[in-house]
Amino acid sequence: MKLFIHLSNNTKDEETIKHSLRRCDCSVNIEGGDIIIVTSSLVTGYPNLSETSILLKTCSKVRSFLGSINGAAKLKNLSFPELTLKKISFENPDKKKIDIPNPVEIHCCFVLGNGQPPDISKIVELSSQNDAVSKALRLYNQELDWDNLSRVYDVIEETGFSFPGITKKTKNAFGGSANRSTISGDSARHGYIKPKGDEPKLIMSLHEARHFMRQVLSNWLESLLQR
């Protein structure tokens, strides 16, 4: 089913968005003052969108798609404005364009750099083909606290990635700092006041952990892109 994802972003951002999505099965157009991402790859067939569960699943797929793009863009560490989903429409079997009833409002962020925008199209393409990449990027697009940093790490670790160039001490420093309130205070993943076991000899601040995760995520994505 062909979906039309209407964004309320300024039309001047069209080329940046189009450049970043050029490897995906979609197109980016301007219609009626809206930037519209058109894709047939998110929903197969013609499901009954009048059913709430199917409607929510469709909106969730759009949210995941945009979240993956946002995470890839955020990875480039550039300033970005907020994009807001204006509405979602679909094309029925008679080729008639119909708005989805009561669409869920979805907010997203998209990197817009100065001058030539970074090329994230390969990462976006990969996220559409790899569930782990999509999830890691969605998590990375959220607040980078200890919880979400650890979740990104978990996703990558589950794929069997060997973390080349990163020592066991560094990994232990990240895990220990994330989990122990004696190191990270109330923002630690665990609430134990007196955690069991010895504290890691090497610890990380949250700022250092964010830098560490940017390195890990970048290295992992690069290894996948080189296959």
Image: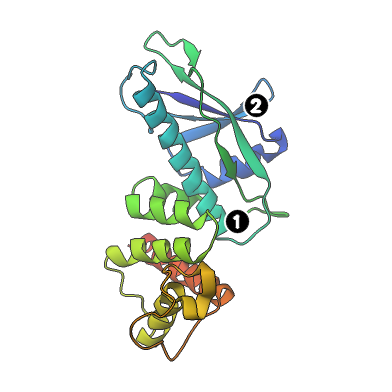
Residue placed at 55% from the left, 47% from the top?
20
User: Mark 1 or mark 2, which is nearer to you?
Assistant: 2
Q: Which sits in the foreground, 48 or 124? A: 48
Regarding mark 2 in the picture, which secondary structure is present there?
strand
125 on left or right of 111: left
Regarding mark 1 in the picture, which secondary structure is present there?
loop
The percent position of residue 15, horizontal first and vertical second, equals: 64, 40
The percent position of residue 100, horizontal first and vertical second, equals: 48, 19
Relative to 18, does residue 75 appear above or below in the rendering? below
The amino acid sitting under disc 1 is Pro
Q: Residues within 10 Å of mark 1 (few under 14, many from 20)?
A: some
Residue 214 visible in the current orientation: yes
Earlier in the chain: of badge 1 and badge 2, it is 2
Kindly report the distance in space between the C-alpha atoms of the residues bearing marks 1 and 2: 23 Å
Residue 130 visible in the current orientation: no
Q: Residues within 10 Å of mark 2 (few under 14, many from 20)?
A: some
Relative to 20, does residue 99 appear above or below in the rendering? above
Q: Which mark is residue 222?
A: none
Relative to 129, does residue 26 appear above or below in the rendering? above
- Residue designated by label 1: 118
The percent position of residue 25, horizontal first and vertical second, equals: 42, 36
The quadrant where residue 84 appears: top right
Relative to 211, does residue 165 appear above or below in the rendering? below
Residue placed at 36% from the left, 88% from the top?
198
Residue placed at 42% from the left, 66% from the top?
150
37 on left or right of 49: right
**Do the numbered discs 1 and 2 sit on residues whose CB atoms are within 8 Å?**
no
Q: Residue furthest bottom?
A: 201
The amino acid sitting under disc 2 is Asp
- Residue designated by label 2: 34
Q: Residue furthest top?
A: 94
